[in-house]
Image (cartoon, helix red, strand yellow):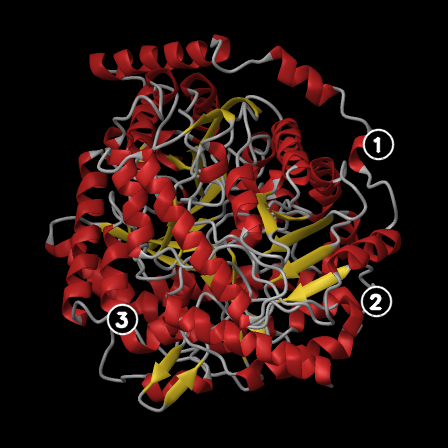
Amino acid sequence: MLLTNNLGYPRVGAFRELKKANEAYWAKKISAQELLQAGLKIREGNWKTQKDAGIDLIPSNDFSFYDQVLDLTLTVGAIPAQYQSLLNNEDKGYNLDLYFAMARGFQQDGVDVTAMEMTKWFDTNYHYIVPEFVKNQEFKLTSEKFLNEYNEAKSLGIETKPVLIGPISYLLLGKEKESGFNRIDLIDKLVPVYEEILGKLAAAGAKYVQIDEPFLALDIDDATRALYTSVFTKLAAAAQDIKIIVTTYFEALRDNEETALNLPVYAVHVDLVRGENQLDTILAKVPASLTLSLGVVEGRNIWKNDYEKSLAQIKKAVDALGKDRVLVGPSSSLLHVPFDLDNEDNEESLPKEVKNWLAFAKQKLAEVKDLAILAEGDVDAKTAERFEANKAAAEDRRTSSLIHKPEVKERTANITDDDAKRTSSFAARKEAQQAKFNLPAFPTTTIGSFPQTKDVRKWRADLKKGAITQEQYDKEIAEETERTIRLQEQLDIDVLVHGEFERNDMVEYFGEQLAGYAFTKNGWVQSYGSRCVKPPVIYGDVYRPADMTVRWSSYAQTLTNRPVKGMLTGPVTILQWSFVRNDQPRSTTTYQIALAILDEVQALEKAGIKIIQIDEPAIREGLPLRKADHQQYLDWAVRSFRVSSSNVDDDTQIHTHMCYSEFNDIIEDIAAMDADVITIETSRSQMELLDAFAADFKYPNDIGPGVYDIHSPRVPSTEEMVELLRKAKAVVPAEQLWVNPDCGLKTRAWPETKAALEAMVEAAKILRAE
């Protein structure tokens, strides 16, 4: 019998129950016990859902209150020194105060620590907390979460497969906090903790353990590659009778095939969605002792599986290996897709025809089970009926008139190189912009959004429900916008923003106004911690039917003599943070979005908005995981940004913003975007990210390195920000520096926002005086 193998399940709950519980705990509205109970309820529901779907290998330890990498950091005791005072050695579970301090910072009872650094999980929009290592790093088993959750499921009568991030990938996901060593050299200290973990799971009766080693699908050096066999030989011995499944995802194995397929383990999982062409070469190399787990159902997008295509792959593997050596599963954890399509009932935002093309996490479990049954050959009537329905949905999507717009395709095909160039050089533009705006040295601004309070969110919800009229809603938004403009003037910020109170999300807001998009009601996906997003669905050709942002930006500008930035989201980010159609190249879809954004840029300029920010926080995130594929992506990604931003006057100043990213290897491409000002998140790394902008490559345009971390509730002092700005000034010429927070302030509260911005402006004034 073909076994079904799920890699991970969404943990936020069908209706964001985890987000609500976490935030209630942080606000001291519920106890730790109540938070733990909320987590248990989600886990139990997930396990039962998977069991009911007929999944054979059900994951445990894939749940997290914040982030699975942070969970492992706590488990192996890699707790940075500044947090040690919060460690409760009696708590072998979640150690919540310590755990959340590492994730969010902590500022009470005489303890004041910043949060650990956060960055993107490979090329997804999920963020993880970066492990920190020192030269004399020690590891010890500090949490038994992995064991506790296995036993929880067992008590329900559900046998699960505990999930661990592998030791090599864990080290590679981290960073050295001091010089003089390579973090991968810590492997000999780390492996004994894994051996202890596996010993405890073996004693508890675990039959399978999933060890994620995604770096086996990435570029790794020979020394790292050589570690895999020796490390997994030790782990296999410690596991005793446990069957280890080494899991890879997000890319093909390529030059790591020999290494992965010859590990002394029960099975290796491969991603046949991102690496769909690797099966033939893999099958030729699979040793007789190895089982192959096939990731055929897309774990990162929401389109229905093409049963016929997947069955061809499964049958090819079965013919080569036999049924007992093939597992069927999703390409990756289902963490990256929404919970349940059955919770979508709004046909205005998600038309019935489009909904019929989709599958969320619960539906993907059914797809995995269907494929196993269909490949097995003994097909019952209901499965046969679903197979026919799957083929009909695929044909309907191929021929639907909802999707294809000839005029959009023609305009996209006619983009020229001139459409992607500013008229003048940056030096000439900067002179024109300074003459227009007369900004001081170290000009201050924010990234765009201001706190979206409960009142703001309630107005939006009331409007949707019909509880208030559009006129009442507009009046509230106008008053909130004016209050925010007055506050920024009072704080003496140089370039203002309108606050974005009318916006639900920086991508969803634009998608709602672009043709070719559909929207879910409960399609929530975790971005980081309690932050969830509801990615819109690009199902067809994209264009802009009308103005999207002009009204509120123009209104804000009438309230002040200071410049107000128009705030837009860039084409690559709109692409990356949506569920993207998979029936045409991503580059084509991005160019369609770029032209829509260009239309909005020109409308803002015509309305008198002369500073326009086009956020591209996801441009680094979209970079392919293999270096050989980088340039092709960067060529169209950078060009699409330039298409969206180039056809404007010299004295129109274009800003862009980017989130936590390593820029060193793509800095020339970032410069090629030719934004007049780039703002980046740098505070958690203590300005280390600026090295990319100032080391071997001198970034030519203006830079605003974030001087405080908006993902943490703590309020930094003026002195902290001054110190960060001095670090920035040491590597970037003062005349190129702007002063701003790390990111938008949407998730923060007003008191901390005011205090932090007041300190930020004071820091800028101190630098001017110096």
Q: Nearer the viewer, residue 181 or 30?
A: 30
Tell me if I can see residue 308 in this picture: yes
Q: Report the residue that reaches farthest toward the bottom.
A: 110
The tag on residue 418 is: 1
The Cα atoms of the two marked residues, 2 and 1, are separated by: 30 Å
Between label 2 and label 1, give the one nearer the viewer: 1
Label 3 is placed on what type of residue? Answer: Tyr
SS under mark 1: helix
Q: Nearer the viewer, residue 672 or 745?
A: 745
Q: Residues within 10 Å of mark 1 (few under 14, many from 20)?
A: few
Label 1 is placed on what type of residue? Answer: Asp
> Residue 264 location in percent, x, y?
47, 54
Q: What residue do we see at 49% from left, 71% from top?
A: 131
Q: Nearer the viewer, residue 753 or 200?
A: 753
Vertically, is 678 above or below 185? above
According to the picture, the residue beneath numbered tag 2 turns out to be 696
The C terminus: image quadrant: bottom right
Q: Nearer the viewer, residue 25 or 205?
A: 25
